[in-house]
Amino acid sequence: MSGQRKDDHVRLAMEQHRARSGINQFDEVSFVHHALAGIDRPDVSLATAFAGIHWPVPLYINAMTGGSVKTGEINRNLATAAREAGVPIASGSMNAYLKDPSCADTFRVLRTHNPRGFVMANINATTTVDGAQRAIDLLQADALQIHINTAQETPMPEGDRSFASWGPQIHKIAAAVDIPVIVKEVGNGLSRQSVHTLAALGVTAADVSGRGGTDFARIENGRREHADYAFLTGWGQSTAACLLDAQDATIPLLASGGVRTPLDVARALALGAVAVGSSGGFLRTLTDGGVGALVTQLTTWLDQLAALQTMLGAPTPADLTRCDLLIHGQLREFCTDRGIDTRRLAQRTPTPSAGTSTGAGTASGAGAGGALNEMTGSTR
């Protein structure tokens, strides 16, 4: 049953991504172009660091699958691509392994085929502390993801219906394990209130994982006999909205959900994310073109992200938070309703005084101060 469900998830997710229009709220975020902002490519680094974690790049392959023969093959190929491209990777939910240890190898391949990479185990919020440690041990994991997914569980025919224990259990796990704990949504987003609650629970970081990527409420509704939860399709906030909503977060934010291009990666970083993940798009590339195609996509994205940083005058991913941003459309309406001052995002770069030579790299804000974290008081 669990293995069939995992295969169904992959099939339905691919159907979604093949039918997607490609438009989401990242398109309502644009950089102000400063024509003399550029810096030299050799001065650009892609390295990012947060909460004691150091990654050579701010891009990661986010949680997908595992638990069946087919999904084990997918995980093996994802791990190979992560190794070749040098990006971190997260497992799919390991609940199947915790219930049935015979499927351990479908997850273990993430480590055996990527022995020196940064690997994140993934569990749900009802997992016991012992179960969390078993998942960590199986992958020799460098970090633990705990996914929260009420909008997926609700239409899931065999889903959870008791959510009150999730917060206390997250707190227990975060206090017990000795590696970083990252709590992530599965595509419906984290509000600022949710992020503050997670900080109080003692987690290391939060992946906002907003609307715009794989819609798991829609997937689970597709598994129902009468598909009677169609009204939950599109539930939640977009990734861009979540990052704007949680500018005052006291824990680092990662971003995933609807990330389609290196420009979306740069947008998310400029909105305050410390790293950006993708799942469905990478899975489609792997499915259509194999491991080589995914490695090419990952390395191309990293090269193009460095090119964007060069043009924008951002020596590091964190420096993108000093670039001027314009917020448009429904995303701007969201900000108005949530009390977010978008004008400050558009005016992060100081205007040079008359007769002052600023030099390349200052026009975009990368060398001119006024970072998002300084603006909002965030400690990220």
Image (spheres, rainbow, N blue to C red):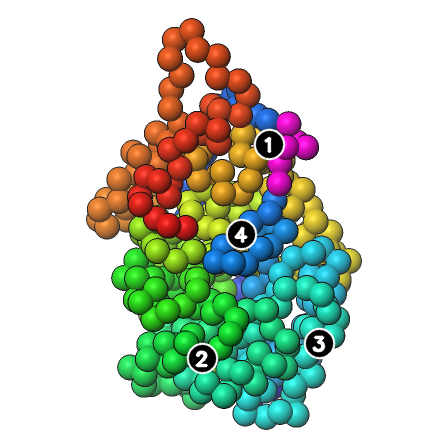
- The mark nearer the N terminus, 2 or 1, is 2
Identify the residue shown where x is 63% and y is 64%: 118
Q: Position of residue 19 (x, y in %)?
A: 54, 60
Q: CA distance from mark 4 to mark 3?
A: 26 Å
Q: Residue furthest top?
A: 355
Q: CA distance from mark 3 to mark 2?
A: 26 Å
Q: Give above or below for 134 relative to 325.
A: below
- The mark nearer the N terminus, 1 or 4, is 4
Q: Which callout, 4 or 3, points to the residue nearer the camera? A: 4
Query: Helix, strand or loop at disc 2?
Result: helix
Q: Amino acid at mark 4?
A: Ala
In the rendered structure, the answer to whether residue 153 lies left or right of residue 115 reads: left
Q: CA distance from mark 3 to mark 1?
A: 36 Å
Q: Amino acid at mark 3?
A: Val
What residue is pinned by disc 4? Answer: 49
- The mark nearer the N terminus, 4 or 3, is 4
Of residue 274 and residue 32, the one placed in the foreground of this image is 274
What residue is pinned by disc 3? Answer: 109
Q: Which callout, 3 or 2, points to the residue nearer the camera? A: 2
Of residue 141 and residue 281, the one placed in the foreground of this image is 141
Q: Amino acid at mark 2?
A: Ala
Of residue 365 and residue 271, the one placed in the foreground of this image is 365
What residue is pinned by disc 2? Answer: 176
- The mark nearer the N terminus, 2 or 4, is 4
Does residue 211 appear in this view?
Answer: no
What residue is pinned by disc 1? Answer: 310
Q: CA distance from mark 2 to mark 1?
A: 42 Å
Query: Helix, strand or loop at disc 4?
Result: strand
Q: Which residues are magenta?
A: 40-45
